Image: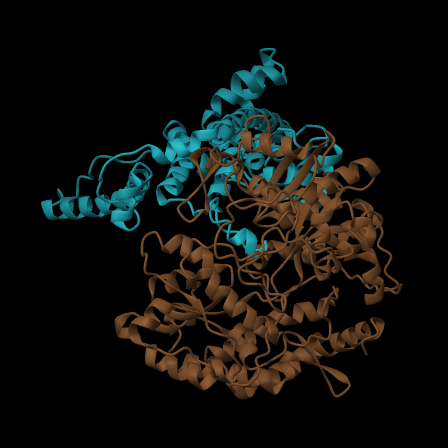
Amino acid sequence: MTLTTRRPAWAEAPTPLEQGAKAAVLGAILLAVLFPIYVVVLTSLSPASAVNDAGGLVVVPRGFSFAAYAELFAGGVVTRAVVVSVGVTTVGTAISLATTVLAAYGLSRPGSLLHRPLLFLVLLTFLFGPGMIPSYLLVSSLGMIDSYWSLILPTAVNAFNLVVMRAFFMSIPAEVSDSARVDGAGEWKILTRLVLPMSKGVTAVVGLFYAVGYWNAFFNAVLYINDNAKWPLQLVLRQYVQQGQNISAGSLADTSQASSLPPGLALQMAIVVIALVPVLAMYPFVQRHFTKGVIIGAVKG
Amino acid sequence: MRQPHPGVQTSRRRFIGLTGAATAALAGGGLLSACAPDGPRPGDGGGTAADLDRLDALVPDHIPFQAVEPDIPGLHGAPPGFTSYPETLVRAVEGVPGSGGSYQAMAPLWGPIPPGLGRNSFYDLVNAELGATVDFQFQDGNTIIDKMNAVIAARDVVDITMIPDWVINLIPSFSEAAPQLFEDLTPYLAGGAVDPYRMLASLPTDSWKWSVFGDRLQGVPWPTDPLSEWIFYRRDLFDEHGWEVPGTADELFALGEEVNDPRGNRWAFGDFYRVVRQVFRAPREWRREGGGLVHRYETPEFEEAVAFMRRVYDAGLVHPDIASGSGANSKELFNSGAIVLGQDGLGAWTETYQAMLGQSPDFRMDLVPAFAHDGGTPSLHRNDPSNQSVFVRKDLGEDRVREILSVLDYCAAPFGTAEYMTYRYGAEGEHYEPDDNGAPRLTELGQKEVSNGYLFISGRNNAVSESEYPDYVESFTTWFNDAAQYGEDNPFEGIRIQRPSSYASAEQPTEDKIEDILRGRREVGELGDIVAEWRSDGGDAARDFYADVLVEYGRD
């Protein structure tokens, strides 16, 4: 479907009032999206004095300071976590995409061996999760505690993404692969030369889903990673937000006056920016595939 | 020895099943329970069932240790007060505790993760003092319950593990799992065996008893103060307006009406239902009466407390954001003066001063002196004697267990010792500098590197020492020395009890119904019906269970 950009012949030209109203509504929506981001970024870049003067989030710039970012990256803990997160996201997305594409292709061919029982098993995971402790026991018995693999392999294949991809592959006419087969192409060649190039959109979208998932994941690291040096960014950043929230360790720890000042607002906002930026930066590149890809799942099961 | 549940032999498979069930139950919001350490404690409290005499034989002899003579001695178990920071520090531990071993330690942390071993001069300093390497694996403090459930089910514990009490209470069958995972410290510490560890020997005996699970001394406790919460008031506002601190429930109500000024954005009270229960002398949980046990829900005192709270709500004396239950932060309302009196944990005092005095130097708060509704003798709910335990992994061998205990001993050195300053703040001039009052202030390096790790792997005797806050030490110790004498007579004092699950799960719905009464959605007259429902939903069964516990401990 393509959007009609030209006005139908019977419609009159919009009056300036109408256009103004549309512009106002669209502008308001744009503002509602951009303003919070603007405030967050500005606050993260404001010196402590500006935050105090504003009594909260900074709307009018009063000086710039990178102090919050400097504090976050001092000590190298956050820097290291960024490297971990980027690594896990990159490797994880690659592995997830590869396995999902291969599995979806296999399950989309009607004649594949055992494809119905296999698909049933995949769909079953929609309904039943293994639960936290069994997952932990499995990861632990495979010797993956404290290994980066524990952040990737347990979540490598997502049933939803697999089903979306399979649905797309099934929508490719059988004639396409039949003709390729007549020309002597094997399954591997059909997948890489024909099916994949026709599925760039869905691949991009599923890749984005996986990447965002890996980037934002923290709970698997809570469970599987003991070594703080291997913590991903989201978990390290969470610790900053929890500063001064000791709720249970008794009076002494509550009064650890020197070490647990609640974090400054600027610091909190810097955390938001750091967590946000990579996804924000990636989005424009995948965005044009996005609507197309998402609708696939909506109209085909 | 007799167990409360003699038939329960928990196999590994069953244990995992149990933990899984608890996890499922937790998924719905169990993390929130972290915010209410004094609230109902569902699940299993550890279920130790040694006789008290037997407990006496399991815990270390008490050898008092005083680093600095307190300016205001603590009475009735209240912490002692120090009105200034000591000029010279006492060395409490002779020689080097460790012998070159290297140990992993798991503890929760609420705060940024410091740089790890090898890139952290604070760790290097303390580990050099210890003569042993402690490698911390910090856990996200708000999700530690999930982590501990998993780690204990998989038996993946590290050498030194700190587990907060509220987490222990939520781990099913912890007392069955503990002996399989953690070293029995009884032979190392019980009675006179504690002699080499003088700091550990100085911890209160009651707190040690709390670390006995299944007839074995399993952990090193974190001694707590005898009381945990009460009503704070804004002393600066009281002084400014000439208000009088209340001494009876009627005075409290009258004060509320005088103070309340919604037009001026000032309300008298935050919620203080839990403290009001104590004001009306309702028991914390059970009370012995006429040869049997009576739960707080069934006492006339409790009904009076509920009726009083209802009056307070009806009169509009509680801040509307709190009355509407919209999850308003009562601390912020108190700090800004929108609430003048409110209940909070006692540690809130220094926390609030730390946050507020910088921006408003005249900000003052204080605790309302302990009182009862009729002006008679108050009856306050006592804290559990310890609220965390530090466990040592099983089968490390005697030498390594002894080395770990020496490390924990060092980290148990109290306020006034050189060791305390080192494991808590690092090196003077490097990680911290004393401010004008002598209070340690972390330097930039200190803020980056210092953490509460060493603090958390042991416990120590408490002290009220934050003399940098104006009048704080004097006011707090005065209040505490008075209030600590009014501890309620609890028939189960010092006994760690595994709560029957029907009893534990009946508590929250009942509290919710009572909340409906407080907020005006039900009438006070319906309390009888609510309590009758509670009885049939597990209350009566729990009464029998608790009565059996009394028999078992020879307290019947």
Residue A239: x, y in percent?
Answer: 51, 42
**Which quadrant of the view contains residue A7?**
top left
Residue B248 visible within the image: yes
Residue B76: x, y in percent?
Answer: 63, 69
Residue A8: x, y in percent?
Answer: 20, 39
B68 in relation to B430, above or below? below
Give whichever of B126, B339 is nearer the camera: B126
B214 in relation to A267, above or below? below
Q: Chain B appears what colour? A: brown
Residue B230: x, y in percent?
Answer: 51, 70
- Residue that protrudes farthest toward the left in the picture: A16
Give whichever of A74, A99 is nearer the camera: A74
State the scheme by which the image is colored.
Answer: by chain
**Which quadrant of the view contains residue B75?**
bottom right
Q: Is A127 left, or right, of A240 in this rendering?
A: right
Q: Tally the marks.
A: 0
Give whichever of B412, A259 is nearer the camera: B412
The residue positioned 84% from the left and 71% from the top of the image is B552
Give whichever of A86, B147 is nearer the camera: B147
Chain drawn cyan, letter? A
Image quarter (top left, top right, bottom left or bottom right) of the C terminus of chain B: bottom right
